[in-house]
Image (cartoon, grey):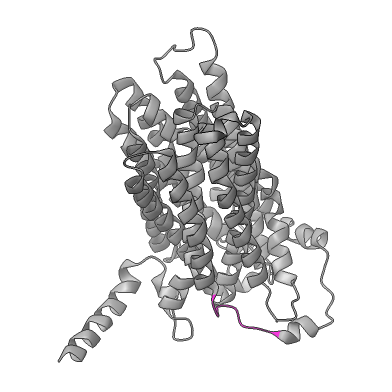
Amino acid sequence: MLKRYRHYAIVKLANLAPRYLPFADVASDDLPLGRLLRLSLFQVTVGMALVLLVGTLNRVMIVELGVPASLVSIMLALPLVFAPFRALIGYRSDTHKSALGWRRIPYIWKGTMLQFGGFAIMPFALLVLSGFGESHDAPLWLGHGAAALAFLLVGAGVHMVQTVGLALATDLVPPRDQPNVVGLMYVMLLVGMGVSAMVFGALLENYSAGRLIQVIQGAAVLTILINVFAVWKQESRNRSRAMAAVPQPAFREAWRSFIAGRYALRRLIVIGLGTAGFGMADVLLEPYGGQVLAMTVSETTRLTATLACGGIVGFGLASRVLSRGADPITMVWYGTLVGIPAFIAIILSATLQIPAIFIIGVLLTGFGAGLFSHGTLTATMRMAPKEQTGLALGAWGAVQATAAGIAIAIGGIIRDVIVNTPDANWFGSGTAYLAVFALEIVLLVLTLAAVSPLRSGKTVDGSGPGMVPLSGRS
C-alpha cells in the first residue's frame, strides 16, 4: 500500500514539474531533471559568493568597520580584471585537450579552488580591519590588501566556474534546448542567492565579527563540497578528442567570426548599458537601507533574497513567454522598462521614510533584471555560431561582468564624493545614494534607446534579430 502511494506521489510530482518549474520541460529520458538540478548546484555556490561579497560583506565593511564605500566598491570591482577573459575561458574550454578526455571539468575545478582560496583569506582580513584581539597592532593597509586579494580570488573563481559550468550544461542537451537549460541554470543562481541570503540573515541575527568569520569559513567548505557533487560524472570522457590532431582556430579568429554576426556588437552594447543600469547600486542597496532607513544587518541581508525572488519571477515569466516563440529582444525592452519605476520607488522610499516602498522597489528591480538577463542570454545563444557555445556564453558574461564591475566602482565613488562635499544633504541624508539611483534611471533610458532599433529590425529571413532559427546557425 505504501509503495503504491509513493509511486502515485512521484508520478504527480513529475507531471507537475514541467508545468510549474521553469525550464523543467528540457529534461528527457537521457537527461533526467534530477541530473540537471544536480549540475545546477554550481550556480548555488556562485550565488552564495555573490551574497557574501555584494551583500553582507560590503555592508559590514562600510557601516560596522568604517571602510570608505569607494574603497569597498573598488574591491568589489577587482574581479573586473578577469571579466574580459570570460570569453577566452569559454573558448579554451571549447578546445581544451586533456589526457582524461575532459574539456570543462578542469576549469570548473580551478575556479572552485580560487573561490575557496579567497574565502580562506577573508577572515584574516576582517580580523585586521575590526582590530580584534592582537590584530589591532597590524597596519591597516594589511587588512585592506588581504580583503582586496580575497575579493579578487573569489571573483576570478566565480567567473571561471560560471562560464564553464554553463557551457557544460549546454553540452548535455540538443541545440534547440540550450537556451532553456542555461535559463534553468540562472534560475538556480537566483534560488541560491535567495536561500543564501535568508540563511546568512538568520545566522547574523545577533551580529558579531566572530560569527561573520564562521559564516565565511562555512561558505568556503560548502563551495568545494557542492561543486564536486554538482559535476560528479556529468561530463563524459572522450579520449579520442585529446588524441585527435585537428587544428583549432586561434582565439582572435574565433572572436572575429563571432562578432561579425548580425547585430552582435549592438547586442553587446545593450547588455553593457542595461547591466550597468541595473547593477550600479548593488553595493549601495544594503548601506542605503542601514544608514537612510535604519534597517538592521539581518534586514538588509534579506534584501538580496527579495532581489533574487523578483529575478526568479522574471525568469519564470520570460521562460513561459519565450518558449511560445516570442522575440527575446522584446523581452529585453520590457525588462528595461520595468527597472525605471523600480528605481523611482527606491528614491521615494527615502523621501517618505517608508522601508516597505524600498523593498517593493528592490523586488521590481530583480523582476526587471530577470526579464532583461533572460532576453539577452536567449538572443545571444540563438545567434551563437556552431561549436562556439563556450565563446558565446563567455562574451555575454564578459560584457555583463565588466559593465557591472565598472558600474559598482563608479557608484561607490559617486557616493563618497557627494558625502564628502560641503552641504551634501541637498535632498536629505540619502542624497549621495539618490544621485546614484537617478544615474541608473538614465542608463536604463539609454538602454531603451539602444534596444529599440533591434525590436524593429528584421533579419534576412524576416524574423526579429533575436529569433534566428536554430537551423540557420553558421
Residue 267 appears in the picture as rendered: no
Left or right: 441 in relation to 207: right
**Percent x, y for residue 198?**
34, 50
**Percent x, y for residue 316?**
38, 59
Name the residue at the left extreme.
Answer: 1
Segment tinted magenta in the rendering = 232-238
Q: Nearer the viewer, residue 376 or 13?
A: 13
When the figure is inspected, residue 140 is found, relative to residue 221, above or below; the finding is above
Q: Is residue 55 magenta?
A: no
At a point 65% along the width and 44% down the height, the residue shown is 149
**Percent x, y for residue 468?**
59, 64
Q: Is residue 236 magenta?
A: yes
Q: Quadrant of residue 105?
A: bottom right
At a point 53% along the width and 60% down the height, the residue shown is 378
Q: Nearer the viewer, residue 319 or 353?
A: 353
**Percent x, y for residue 473?**
65, 69
At a point 71% along the width and 53% down the height, the residue shown is 85
Residue 460 appears in the picture as rendered: yes
Left or right: 369 in relation to 292: right
Q: Quadrant of residue 257?
A: bottom right
The prevailing secondary structure element of the residues shown in magenta is loop
Q: Nearer the viewer, residue 251 or 432?
A: 432
Q: Nearer the viewer, residue 290 or 179?
A: 290
